[in-house]
Amino acid sequence: MLMMDAPIKWILIMFLGLFLGAPLQGQSQMASISGRVTSVSEPIPDVNIRIRGSRIGTSSDAEGQYRLEPLEKGTYEILASAIGFEPFAIKITLSENEHRVLDISLSPSVESLDDIVVSGTLKPVRRLASPVPVEVYSPAFLQKNPSPNVFEALANVNGVRPQVNCNVCNTGDIHINGLEGPYTLVLIDGMPIISGLGTVYGLSGIPNSLISQVEIVKGPASSLYGSEAVGGLINIITKHPPEAPELEADGYMTGWGEYNLDLGSKFALGDKTSLLLGLNYFNYDIPIDNNNDNFTDVTLQNRISVFQKWNFLRPKQRIFSLAGRYLYEDRWGGEMQWTPEFRGGDQIYGESIYTSRWELLGRYQLPVDTPFMLSFSYTSHDQNSVYGNTTYLADQRIGFGQLTWGPEWNAHDLLLGAAVRYNYYDDNTPATSNQFGNNPDEVWIPSLFAQDEIGLGEKHSLLLGSRLDLDQRHGVIFTPRFAYKWKVSDSDLFRLNAGTGFRVVNLFTEEHAALTGAREVVIREELDPERSYNININYSKKIYSSGGIYLNLDASLFYTYFTNRIIPDYETNTDQIIYDNLDGNSISKGISANMDLALPSGLKVLVGATLMDVSSTENGIKTRQILTEQFTGTWGITYEIRPLRLLLDYTGNIYGPMRLPLLGELDPRSEYSPTWSIQNIQLTYSGLDNFEIYGGVKNLLNWTPNRSAPFIIARADDPFDRNVAYNPDGQVVATPDNPYALTFDPTYVYGPNQGIRAFLGLRYRL
């Protein structure tokens, strides 16, 4: 039985019903001014709006809305200012009891047509000035298609695909440019919080209301971040407590019976301490089986996550912040008649996962004149899982500390650093045992890294970097890095990046199929670290016309060459997963492009597409990588109906065919998936003070994978393989009861099983 379900669910329902009793603003006894702040039709939050010569002022909310009151009749000068925009001023005259609507349009300053980013170089720089291409996504982007976690929210980012890895428990990871989740490093505020077990289970529960922006770097970043940053990194940057809203709440429900609530608030604790507090709660507890295989289409979940971030004011504006998060999740999927008393038994099949996870991270600027920054994080992940009658118990702890020094000298912008990483992993599988008994994996990895960005005149810069990691299992690992930036003009930028990456593998934290009990795990040899060699060429062009038209074009060519790659072999023996280092090479290559267009009419279009080829060559035979699409496209079209205070969002993605894991030559399912698309539509009404009401439809086409396959889960009627026959070599043989020679297997999955559904939500911001 899922925990904590009814009370919080009804709190959410009551929250969503608040707008029914929210009093509409009647005519004030005093005058007032309200409106919306935009730039090229995009709402601008946190704009400082005040009346010259008075103490009356406010700031715009997430949708750019503001209100000034109470005002007496008279003439006022309204001032609006925000970092990165030209100042705005206008004089207006109000009569008694008048309410004036004043929409403000801010013009970007020439040098601020980009955001501040930190992920590419570990230093805050403007995106156009960064030698490393960094994509930035704001909370407004995440709200175009509301989701209960960051994992699902990134589905509309070009080249980034959330991959569901199991049809039963729906755990997943994030692919960047076709590379699987373990090659993606996920950070919170620059700290490697999510890796190992967290790559599979830890992407849920980050409160979206606390996110300031999401930065994505595609391509290896091991020279700065070490292992796991091979395919790219995702850096989730939380809000700075002094600048966060007093209170922010966002809750919605869907026609499938899903409930999600995000809460965020800040508190001042004295003159020198501020606290940011956030909570995420998600519940779904209605088993649904629309594809009629007697298995739940979507896993049932009950999740709560609590986040705190403390900011301490210090002399000379030195930084000191401390943050922590706790997550608990209870999820299960399986046969429709499964209940908790069947957990771990062999009567009714179910996959039940209890996850308890806490994280601590902080930044402290040393009290010296030179700019030394100490960053640290620690995570503890405890997992209690059963897959049918197979139990998986795991305990993982990851500690990380880093000291950086970033001096500037003439044309050199330096970054020097030392880091140490502590990994502890223990489970109840052969991965952490030997002939003497239990043998947890415990390792310290100290590192040194250096980076120098050299200015070569007004239009050229060069970045050189390298990192040394000392792994007691694999010795010294060297990862160099090179980047060149050419500012062709004020609106044209060319970047060239090259470097290497590495990854130390822990199989049992990455391959969900290895944990289900459906297959035996076979490790043929002692596994060496994977190495990668990457080159990325990027060109971007920005056009901002005096008529209010904004256009941004961005295109990249990427090529990554792997050695020692570890690719699970599902096909040699359908009852096994075989691991060894690839005796050959693996290549990921392709082209990616984005277009961002905003028109004064209120229309905004964001379109992206990626073509890629990810394959491996061994013994002269080239094979396409399993579960990797040939092409992908994403789009987001927003239109603002200003007189009605309505915002229309149409978002979607499309994925090309990908090779799927079959269970043998007789398997009747297709070896390749069809081209498929998930599309969504949303309407947002912002005509109430501090409130937004939104609703729409997810998966408009009602697409699910079972449309193109005779079945999704193999042998769903015999999940414990009681009626499976084997030959003397251990291979499954066809029988009248099993004509396709299959075993129970839930890994034939490439898209979500959840069909069309409506949703309705409410946001409040103070």
Image (tube, rainbow, N blue to C red):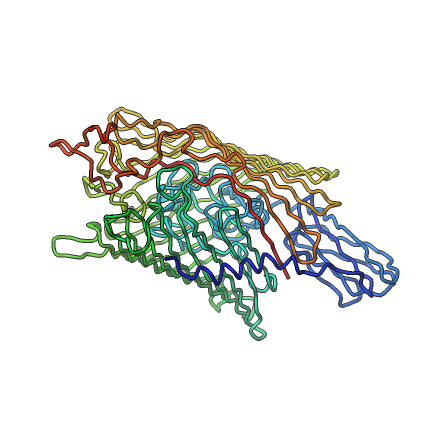
What is the total number of numbered labels drawn onto the structure image? 0
Task: Determine which quarter of the picture holds residue 595.
Answer: top right
- Left or right position of 247 against 302: right
Residue lying furthest top in this view? 620
The residue shown at (46%, 66%) is 366
Quadrant location of the N terminus? bottom left
Comparing 9 with 141, the one in front is 9
Q: Position of residue 197 (x, y in %)?
A: 34, 52
Q: Give the percent coordinates (x, y) of residue 266.
A: 57, 66
Residue 684 at x, y percent in the picture = 64, 47
* Residue at the outermost bottom position: 270
Task: State whether residue 676 appears in this view.
Answer: yes
Residue at screen point 81% across, 54% down: 90
Residue 293 quadrant: top left
Of all residues, the one furthest to the front in this rendering is 337
Give residue 130's position: percent from left, percent from top.
53, 45
Query: Along the line of sight, which residue is nearer the eye, 569 or 219?
Result: 569
Q: Is residue 220 among what the camera can see?
A: no
Q: Nearer the viewer, residue 172 or 254?
A: 254
Q: Residue at x 18, y 53 (%)?
A: 433
In the picture, the quarter occupied by the C terminus is bottom right
Give the residue at x 80% y 61%. Answer: 27
Judge left or right: residue 217 versus residue 110.
left
Q: Is residue 39 left or right of residue 340?
A: right
Above or below for 79 versus 568? below
